[in-house]
Amino acid sequence: MAAVYNFAIDQGATFTIDFAYRTAANAVIPLTNYTARMQARTSVTATSTVIDATTANGQLTVTGATGVVNLTLTATQTAALSFATAVYDLEIVSPQNVVTRLVQGTIRLSPEVTR
């Protein structure tokens, strides 16, 4: 079962967050040659995404040796966000095409005042 982690994004600011894949004993689970994908939507049933990050579009990076998946959004990208809250999940894909949901939860957008 995926871990649950809720977080906030400051609209208009550069945003970065690391998700570490670990055992129950906190040992690193290597992610060498893995890819990752993450989508956020205003609801689970919403047809459109508010965030669609992948290793292919450069918003997600996987550091295999450390088991870390990093999400980075530029200030321009976060300025374009316009939701109050969203749900998300992050999946990793092995070289053998095995998909694992690593983490899921909610994202709160903290609106920007200075533009």
Image (tube, rainbow, N blue to C red):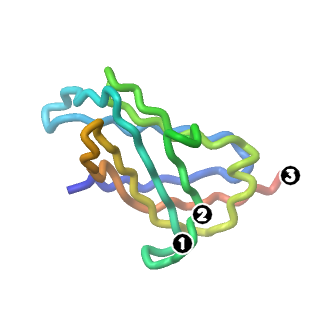
Residue at the spot x=40%, y=39% of the render? 35
Q: Is residue 44 left or right of residue 3?
A: right
Residue at the spot x=30%, y=48% of the render? 102
Along the line of sight, the residue nearer the viewer: 4 or 56: 56
Query: Which residue is farthest left?
Result: 25
Q: Residues within 10 Å of mark 3 (few under 14, many from 20)?
A: few
Amino acid type, mark 2: Val
- The quadrant in which the N terminus is found is bottom left
Q: Nearer the viewer, mark 1 or mark 3?
A: 1
Mark 2 vs mark 3, CA separation in Å: 20 Å
Q: Position of residue 25 (x, y in %)?
A: 13, 32
Q: Which residue is mark 2?
A: 50
Q: Which residue is mark 1?
A: 42
Mark 2 or 3 closer to N-term? 2
Q: Position of residue 28 (x, y in %)?
A: 23, 27
Amino acid type, mark 3: Arg
Q: Residues within 10 Å of mark 1 (few under 14, many from 20)?
A: some
Q: Nearer the viewer, mark 2 or mark 3?
A: 2
Mark 1 vs mark 2, CA separation in Å: 7 Å
Q: Are marks 1 and 2 in contact (CB under 8 Å)?
A: yes
Taking 59 as reference, is 32 above or below it? above
SS for dot 1: loop
Q: Position of residue 57 (x, y in %)?
A: 58, 42
Q: Which residue is mark 3?
A: 115
Amino acid type, mark 1: Thr
Q: Are marks 1 and 3 in contact (CB under 8 Å)?
A: no
Q: Quadrant of residue 112?
A: bottom right
Mark 1 or 2 closer to N-term? 1
Mark 1 vs mark 3, CA separation in Å: 24 Å
Mark 1 or 3 closer to N-term? 1
Along the line of sight, the residue nearer the viewer: 97 or 75: 97
